[in-house]
Amino acid sequence: MKTAKYLSEDVVIQKAVDALMKALGPVEAFRFMNMPKRKKVESVKRHRDWQQTLNKTKFFDEVFSG
């Protein structure tokens, strides 16, 4: 049985930065790396948002149709 061989985190990061620099150039690569991360929607709010768009009749028909 073969063991999977993974690159170290440092190597992966360096390869990713190199790819970004090659694809975008130094200014846009730097801009991309400094973009703020989007906040995740809290799970209860996400669930309530989903419930508001839910067609309950269709949902129950699909779930309990056998």
Image (cartoon, rainbow, N blue to C red):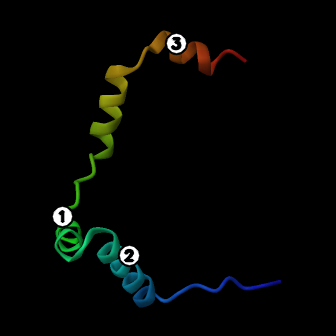
Q: What residue is drawn where x is 52% and y is 12%? A: 58
In this rendering, would 19 be left or right of 57?
A: left
Q: Is residue 15 above or below residue 65?
A: below
- Give, as a three-letter code, the residue at label 1: Met
Residue 32, x across and y down, in percent: 22, 66
Residue 57, x across and y down, in percent: 49, 10
Disc 1 to disc 2, C-alpha distance: 17 Å
State the mark number for residue 35.
1
SS label for mark 1: loop
- Give, as a three-letter code, the residue at label 2: Ala
> Looking at the image, is mark 1 or mark 3 nearer the viewer?
1
Residue at which label 3 appears: 58
Q: Is residue 10 above or below residue 56?
A: below
Residue 40, x across and y down, in percent: 27, 51
Which residue is at the front of the view, 23 or 58? 23
State the mark number for residue 61.
none
> Looking at the image, is mark 1 or mark 2 nearer the viewer?
2
10 Å crowding of disc 2: few (<14), some (14-19), many (20+): few
Q: Quadrant of the C terminus?
A: top right
Residue at which label 2 appears: 19
Q: Are marks 1 and 3 in contact (CB under 8 Å)?
A: no
In this rendering, would 54 be left or right of 25?
A: right
Which of marks 3 and 1 precedes in the sequence? 1
Residue farthest toward the right in the current orientation of the protein: 1
